[in-house]
Image (tube, rainbow, N blue to C red):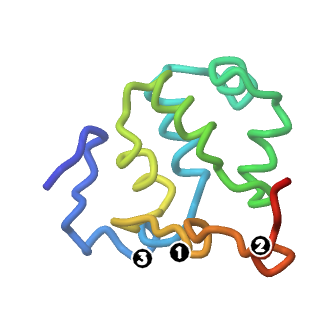
Amino acid sequence: MTNQVGIDMNNDADGDDLLQYNPNRLLDTLIENLRLKNDAALSRALEVAPPVISKIRHHRLPVGASLLIRMHEVSDLSIRDLRYLMGDRRNKFRISDKQFKPKEPVDGGSSTQG
């Protein structure tokens, strides 16, 4: 299966470099697809400060959900393709079940309403 960016998603012959987290591949592909000159132009297109792109490139800042959505809006690449480009191969995202449990009452549940 080949995705929109021309990457064969089922072929392992591409090497381990596609399996590793590498936000530079994502940023470089965006620059190429949007026909931009450099990271500064990409930061303007994404409406983020230039240091954000630099921090992502140097692995000091992860690509957050809001930035990923902005990349999708600007490039018309699917979120799946964008995640694939940076090396994220997860099929599902799981949220801890603790986030859906009701909070325990502080006073043991014996509150009186008056």
Mark 3 Cα-neighbour bin, 10 Å: few <14, some 14–19, many ≥20:
few
Q: Residue at x 79, y 43 (%)?
A: 54
Residue 59 falls in image quadrant: bottom right
Residue 9: percent from left, percent from top: 24, 60
Tell me the crowding category of disc 2: few under 14, some 14 to 19, or many 20 or more residues within 10 angstroms, Cα based: few
User: Measured from the top left, where is residue 65 in percent x and y?
Assistant: 59, 45
With respect to residue 103, does 70 lie above or below?
A: above
Q: Earlier in the sequence, mark 1 or mark 3?
A: 3
Mark in the foreground, 2 or 1: 2
Between marks 1 and 3, how big is the CA–CA gap?
33 Å
Q: SS class of the residue under badge 1? A: helix
Mark 1 nearby-residue class (10 Å; few <14, some 14–19, many ≥20)? few
Q: Amino acid at mark 1?
A: Asp
Marks 2 and 1, Cα distance to the nearest angstrom?
18 Å
Q: Which residue is mark 1?
A: 97
Instruction: Classify mark 3: helix, strand or loop.
Output: helix
Amino acid on which the number 2 mark rests in the picture: Pro
- Indicate left or right for 12 with 110 as reference: left
Residue highlighted by disc 3: 16
Q: Kindly identify which residue carries mark 2.
A: 105
Residue shown at 62%/38% (left/top)?
A: 66
On the rendered structure, is 4 left or right of 46? left
Q: How many marks?
A: 3
Q: CA distance from mark 2 to mark 3?
A: 50 Å
24 w.r.t. 94: above or below: above
Q: Nearer the viewer, residue 89 or 43?
A: 89
